Amino acid sequence: MTPKIKLLIWKIKHGALPVGEVLRARQIIPNSKCIRCDCSETIIHLFFHCEFARKVWELIPVSGGFNCDQVVNFDAAWKSALQATVLPPIGLADTSLAPWIISSIWTARNFLIFQKRQFSAQETMVKEICDAKEWKSAQSTLSPPTRNTIYPPIRHNYEFTCRSDAAWKKELNSGGVAWSFYNSSGERINSHSEPVAFMEHAIALQLGSVIFESDSLQLVAAIVGDSSFSEIHEILSDIRILSTAFVSISFRFIHRENLKFEDSIAKQALSRFVVTRFNQAI
């Protein structure tokens, strides 16, 4: 299992994965709807009960199949999936597909949110089998395994900059978050205001080297200085864990006047959130 997938599983088991239910509980989004259906996006729904996830598990060539209807908690389902025997002629009889199934479902979900790219259950199943075979092959041909055999291919080997900003409405206890990615020439290549962590967006885009810029001097100082503030302990913990997925990563302070674009789309995101809450109220 790759370190990236280990991180994903760790976040799932510790309730740190930003699924709809978690984001709504933190008042980042007004509802927890699954992007594919009207059900609440919980861990169990996303990976097992959603119709898309069910189709993916149904396609997996394992002995006895995998019954998503029996899943009531992640730990039990994870243990059961790990023990499932892959059928021939896949060539993975001694390897569990469970880690790659979970990873592929999460990746497909992020592509749909971030890039509006939709993958079928069949395509997702093929990807997870190919990834598992590639990883197994790398482990058998290289000893000890190097970083390049552990992580999936990095799409870019040069540095990107991510600038982020947030807007807050105190009376509604609500916020809007936005960020943009810039290439090494300073050209803006991607902007986003969906309620998902920008570091995870960078990972989804497979950006290997990133400088994250923020106008929060306290946050940057806490990250760079490896400090621990009780008020932002959870944020710092998530940042340090996600940092391991990059080839290189750094954080630096940037003056607010350089975040005018990100500020504008953060305010737009907040405005949409406020309107949505208002419409729900009436």
Image (cartoon, rainbow, N blue to C red):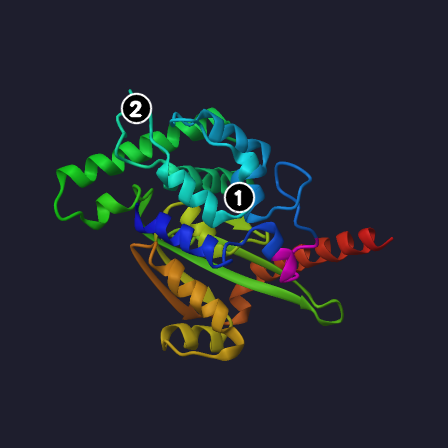
Q: Is residue 219 above or below residue 204?
A: below
**Quarter where residue 177 is shown:** bottom right
Q: Name the main secondary structure of what is drawn in magenta.
A: loop
**Residue 176, position as x, y percentages in the image:** 64, 60
> Picture coordinates of residue 262 (x, y %)?
57, 59
Please name the residue shown 67% across and 55% down the image.
268
Q: Which contiguous range is marked in magenta?
A: 23-30
Q: Name the residue under label 2.
A: 90
Q: Using the image, determine if residue 224 lies above or below residue 7.
A: below
Secondary structure under the numbered disc 1 in the rendered image: helix
Task: Name the spot of residue 93 as percent of width and height, x first.
Answer: 27, 29
Residue 153 in the figure: left or right of residue 61 = left
Query: As drawn, is 248 to the left or to the right of 278?
Result: left
Labelled pair 2, 1 in contact (Cβ < 8 Å): no
Task: Tell whether 244 sits left or right of 216.
Answer: left
* Residue where numbered disc 1 is placed: 114
Can you tell which of label 2 and label 1 is closer to the viewer? 2
Q: Residue at x 59, y 36 (%)?
A: 50
Q: Residue at x 23, y 36 (%)?
A: 136
Quarter of the N terminus within the rendering: top left
